[in-house]
Image (cartoon, rainbow, N blue to C red):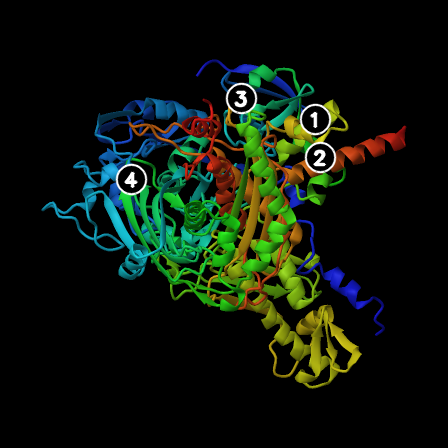
Amino acid sequence: MKDEITREERVDNLKGMGCSRKRVEDARFTQGKGNYVDDIKLDGMLFGDFVRSPYAHARVKSINKDTALKVPGVLAVLTADDLRPLGLHWMPTLAGDKQMVLADGKVLFQGQEVAFVVAEDRYAAADGIEAVEVEYEELPVLVNPFEALKSDVVLREDLVAEDGSIPAGAHGPRKHHNHIFTWEAGDKDPTEEVIANAEVVAEESMYYHRTHPCPLETCGCVASMDKVNGKLTLWGTFQAPHAIRTVVSLISGIEEHNIRVVSPDIGGGFGNKVGAYPGYVCSVVASIVTGKPVKWIEDRMDNLMTTAFARDYHMTGKISATKEGKITGLQCHVTADHGGFDACADPTKFPAGFMNICTGSYDIPTAFLEVDGVYTNKAPGGVSYRCSFRVTEAVYFIERMIEVLAIKLNMDAAELRRINFIKKEQFPYKAALGWEYDSGDYHTAWDKALKTVDYDGLRAEQAQRVKDFKAGKTRKLMGIGLSFFTEIVGAGPVKNCDILGLGMFDSCEIRIHPTGSAIARLGTISQGQGHATTFAQILASEIGLPADSITIEEGDTDTAPYGLGTYGSRSTPVAGAATAMAGRKIRAKAQMIAAYLLEVHDNDVEFDVDRFAVKGAPEKFKTMKEIAFAAYNQAIPGLEPGLEAVSYYDPPNMTYPFGAYVCVMDIDVDTGVPEIRRFYALDDCGTRINPMIIEGQVHGGLTEALAVALGQEIAYDDMGNVKTGTLMDFFLPTAWEVPNYETDFTVTPSPHHPIGAKGVGESPHVGGVPCFSNAVQDAFRPFGNTHTNMPHDHWRIWRTANELGLHD
Amino acid sequence: MSKKKHVTLNVNGKTEEFLAEPRELLIYTLRERLNITGPHIGCETSHCGACTVTIDGKSVKSCTMFAVQAEGAEITTIEGIGGPDNLHPLQEAFKEHHGLQCGYCTPGMITRATKLLEEIPNPTEAEIRFGMAGNLCRCTGYQNIVKSIQAAAAQMSAAKEAAE
């Protein structure tokens, strides 16, 4: 057979790794044909919604549902008493705690689920909610974790023994009835000693405020119990559908093979859709009770007030260095506000997530971290909002501590970073708090970033601006925000990462069809990341069939292999690896088939783009398409028919993407309005699968970083009322407020990942938050500012200027 | 609840008649009654724009309008803008320039953009950013949405010139 096209054309035809393949998802989304959970309609489907507590802490004295049951269209009202006989009035959390499904005698946060009204439609459900009579007795409210640790008020009576003693929790001994755990990493005494004897020590306390992932689509589900076949189907906004299936099985007693969990299209997740929420449990129970499908969809207030907050870390640090700026030690203490139940979504052994990546990108010989988790009268959650577990907090902490140390040393913060970076030759690098960084080349990335933005020129301009400001020529200050981050993603190795005992491997199953197309199913689930596009690219390069001929399917537990889902940038590091490994199994069998067809020994053929060719005789070959057909139509001695493979991939290590960001900002000291003049983002996510999608992820992550740094928060008043429960008060930036970003990259492949990829979706958020924050703080550095807390909204920036005497 | 009212709407060229309570929101009518699920619900307070439709030539957030208020109106949703055989240039441009990720804001975003380009056929970047500020996106950071709208505007202008 004559080869009519060039090798380069054959590579292009595959649309494999490295090309900006257009997304296969977009046709349906641009035509309004996506299928999100609220688009699902089933015959006789009912609608459930919650009666929620107006109080942050109260006893529930009584619930009267008689009037509600008379409301037209209302079929049932469930309370904790109805769920108790089933043992479903409480449910386990991902953090080893338990959480009330419906208020069991008391409520612990505003918006807590008190009763579940099941009705024919949303309007009837709303009428029913109005008619449920709940009598509350208010209790003292604790919204400050430091006060909670001193208070006599017991938030969780269920966690205090009858004799008044405090039993240990899931993560060890508890010091107080409102204390959840103490978690430590590193060496306490040596660190304290290094800091006590250091030439220079900088100290700072900072509050990383509570915020929320707030995807545009809220959480929801449709539960349908088929009593004839005994099968429960649960469609929902699940970032981890298999884990949800296992949890539903464990708490309901329905055998796992009789539960089908489906994640349809998901309108953004960002961590919000990892956990299990009372709405899911109540919908399942309501479907069992009524025999009909039941839908539950949060409204925006429900979403912001009750499901999955993020951050809320009070962090205190000490960093020590020599006079020349070489860092010698780091100490960090965190008081972590977890709300009324500990429902943080972290691997079991990591109650503070990967906060122990807080030594950042620096070669810090000695470090110690201690985290205290605390109950308060706030909503439970503690999810990783566009980051790996608590990595935003860790990176914010170290990138602020570096700035504070630079001020103390009277040194340039870029230079301080440079002299402390882990050097390229030090990788794999064992950090003081335990992680082994797989790879990195920080100096190259940093130099490229500073050169591109003309860092020295920016500093000169800034110095001139300060002079002009002092001379009364301008009212605008200039801030240069720097950040260099190292993420830790791709959880993770089964030896140390599990959720509810389920190892955090992931999976891919491939079936090649006779005519040379394929379907691959994965244990992950896209929420906008474009998996159907990019995983097909990985496979195209691995198996030599065009990406356009490969369907990627996720999210249906009846068909997809078991996996732990999509969050913490784990899809590419874990499921992407499984995809490559399954592809290699396909290729191994294809090699044997090709050798048989070409009548040579297995070792005498080699893979080349889309075919196996005889070594030294490239004109003799069989394309993967021909091989696929042969797998189904020829009896090949020693081989089973068909061409399929499955891989379960347990990663040997995390991956460690990194990046260098610079933000240039002009701040009007009289209005407090920051104007982002320039934002440069260099990301190193290892091997790049689809540059177009990477760039899109970076734009999005930076915008969510801008939101968090400059205004987005879940705020409470002293009574535990949520002050930011709608999009009127909760800041989501519009196109008008967002700048254009410049993206750049270096490529340092992961040495242990089959294709060298590291993950990118969360890096821009992790690195972006400190970069925006540092820009604001840097503008005020010449006037004596050391640190101010986020969010830097206009009012707080104005207040900083005012406190520094800039309005005098 | 109060007495149902007779409502007549023209949605995507088709006349729809029904009885609805005065409190029935237009987004509910579209999604639940008429099975037009392109417009989405994101906030219920007119902030996010996921529910944007065109009513009598104006961009409207259908989550804060009652169906009865739309009596007699001509309504266009994403479903009426273009389909597999007649894609609108904006639908093509959003795909070409990666102007979407999760897709949840996309129907409202494109619906709004069709009106923006009628109002200003060749908008500047600032005009696009200002004109689209009523539609929130959590995924893209807007940069590629702006690029998509610019590309569609250029294509539509070129097509119009060629036709003249």
Indicate left or right for A634 with A529 as reference: right
- Check disc 1 and report the residue beneath it: B116
Mark 3–mark 4 contact, CB under 8 Å? no
Callout 2 secondary element: helix
Q: Chain of mark 2?
A: B
Task: Please determine whether, in this image, residue A749 is positioned above or below residue A168.
Answer: below
Query: Mark 3: which amino acid?
Result: Thr
Q: CA distance from mark 3 to mark 4?
A: 34 Å
Q: Amino acid at mark 4?
A: Gly
Q: Chain of mark 4?
A: A
Q: Residue at x 65, y 30 (%)?
A: B129
Q: From mark 3 to mark 1, how far is it between C-alphas?
A: 21 Å
Residue type at the position of mark 1: Leu
Q: Chain of mark 3?
A: B
Under tag 4, what secondary structure? loop
Name the residue tied to disc 3. Answer: B64
Q: Residues within 10 Å of mark 4 (few under 14, many from 20)?
A: many
Badge 2 is on which residue? B149
